Amino acid sequence: MSNLGFRVLPVENRPDKVLVKEFESVVTPHISDNMARLSAIGPELRPYHKGGKLTGTALTVKTRPGDNLLVHKAIDMAEPGDVIVVDAGGETTNAIVGEIMMRIAQKKGINGFVINGAIRDLEAIKEDVFPVFAVGVTHRGPYKDGPGEINVPISIGGTIVKPGDIVVGDDDGVVVVPAEDANRILQLVKAQQIRESEILESIENGTVDRSWVDASLREKGCEIIDTADQI
């Protein structure tokens, strides 16, 4: 019988590692733009590490706020390239991970943590390039009692994260790309990169076309008065 709410499941399907690696060269705003700007997992999740891109495959954890027993299990079962994504309810009273767990994860080749909750040992985390995204910081440590679940769909900031989804994080935040849509999204993002590089070049050489602004305003019914005598 399934022990709903207190169970550990495997990741059934991981995306191709070459595909995941391609997301290292793209930024979260471009990914977000090509996913209808609805798939960010919360602006309150901020990077606390020294700097560097987060890219990897989601290993999900749903845990009781302030309890990290299932997060320890997730670290033990994670594969190199995984990102441990934890829904701890957004509660920041107790930390979910700290330096010791970070060091174990680094040694195992885990690519980072995304914690919908708090962390601690900030001095060590902010001096390291190991990606750690969280809601807040507290010195208060966690409990280790459970319950919780590993590798079930979780929700953070209204976005569903499934085991095996592709996680990308940078200074602008974290976005999750459903594994089944990753190839298509990547191609759209690369096309946007080209378009925006052309725009930046036109700004630099003074040929940028801004006529779309007035055209859009007029289309929406805005009256544009250029001189005072037109009033």
Image (cartoon, rainbow, N blue to C red):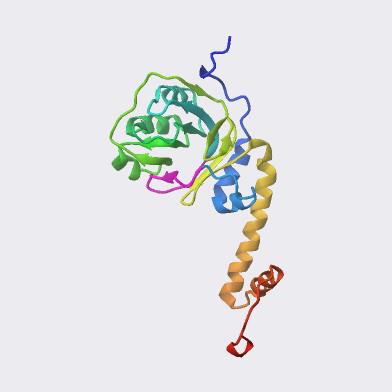
Is residue 186 visible in this depiction of the protein? Answer: yes
Q: Which is nearer the eye, 33 or 15?
A: 33
Q: Residue at x 59, y 40 (%)?
A: 20
Q: Give the residue at x 58% y 38%.
A: 166
Residue positioned most to the bottom: 229
Q: Quadrant of the C terminus?
A: bottom right
Q: Verify whether residue 198 appears in magenta.
A: no
Chain part drawn in magenta: 42-55
Q: Is residue 209 visible?
A: no
Residue 11 position by quadrant = top right
The secondary structure making up most of the magenta span is loop
Q: Position of residue 7 (x, y in %)?
A: 51, 17
Judge from the rendering whether residue 214 lies leftward or rightward of residue 167; answer left or right: right
Q: Is residue 43 magenta?
A: yes
Identify which residue is drawn at 58% across, 68% down: 200
| Residue 182 picture location, percent across and down | 65, 41
Q: Nearer the viewer, residue 66 or 230?
A: 230
